[in-house]
Amino acid sequence: MGSRYKNQIIGLMRFSYPSLGGFVTKNESADQIEARLYEDARLERRFHLFENLALPSLLAQSDQDFRMVFLVGQSLPSQWRDRLNDVIAPLKGARVVALASLPHYMAVRRAFNFATPDAATHVTGFRLDDDDALDINHVARMRATVNALLPVAGLDTPLVTGCHRGYFLEFKPEGHALFHVIEKAPGAQGLAMTRPAGSSENIFRRNHRFVTQFYNTYTDANIPAYIRTIHTDNDSDPHASGQIETADWETAAPLIAEHFPFTAAQLQAL
């Protein structure tokens, strides 16, 4: 595509950001949202999953040519802000963006804009929650898919790319359960939108289950591309829109080792 096209891949993670809207819990005041999100025990649990699941999957990407924005509230207590800065230091292209509490979509638009270089003609912005993981070739596969399809879809038209095969990891006192999932619609984990750099659109504009109603969309059904955790702190309602079946740990172990930077035993011990 030559000089007409310079794509910047940017990931966005909302790290306990107290947005006005965007949560399952409704009718909370700004103070109530912050009190819930910044409760010490909750943040300790979030960091545990981030440091052992999400961050290792980013550090292990075979294609490291991407930026990663961590959106936090300006009100995030300093000890947690410092801890976040410390743990993401090894991640090339990582940046913390701290904003006041804003309506959800306004906040993510600003966060993406902070990380977009002037030279970029297009941005491929993907989303990831702090308690989930991507397969190690996710960014590389995303780049190859966009390069192949954007000339067909059109340089001025948003293109959504993602995946709908992966694992749900449910935390249970008696032992974690693993489920193999093939969604009918693309999952939120790693879901991306490629759009012109000056566009106001991004992957958070629509609910991830409905993107095919609004955008040209390609999703991969062959690669186990994500691990989504299910636990008491989920900020959204975790459910599969398609096929879900219990996965045997021993059978799943080789696939997990092949596609992710951890073993089945490590997932069971989280």
Image: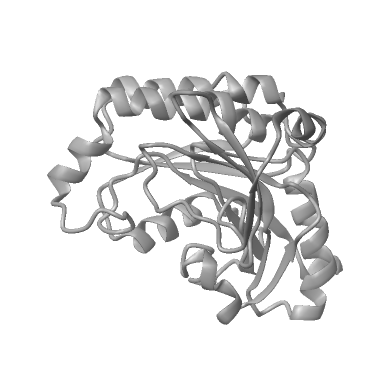
Asked if 138 appears above or below 102 in the picture, the reply is above
Residue 157 x %, y %: 65, 79
Q: Residue at x 80, y 71 (%)?
A: 149
Residue 4 quadrant: bottom right
Is 109 or 6 nearer to us in this picture?
109
Point 58% across, 30% down: residue = 53
Residue 212 is situated, as x and y percent measured from the top left of the image, at 61, 76
**Left or right position of 80 against 119:** left
The residue shown at (54%, 29%) is 176
Give the color scheme: rainbow, by chain, secondary structure or one colour: one colour
Q: Quadrant of the N terminus?
A: bottom right
The picture quadrant where one finds residue 107 is bottom left
In-image side of 257 versus 102 (left or right)? right
Decide if residue 90 is in sight here.
no
- Numbered disc total: 0
| Residue 241 location (% of width, % of height) | 56, 63
Residue located at (83% from left, 57% from top): 144
Q: Say above or below: 3 vs 174.
A: below
Who is closer to the viewer here, 112 or 231?
A: 231
Q: Is residue 40 visible?
A: yes
Query: Which image quadrant: the C terminus?
Result: top right
In this orientation, which residue lies closer to the viewer: 251 or 158?
251
Residue 155, quarter of the rendered image: bottom right
Residue 227, x across and y down, in percent:
62, 41
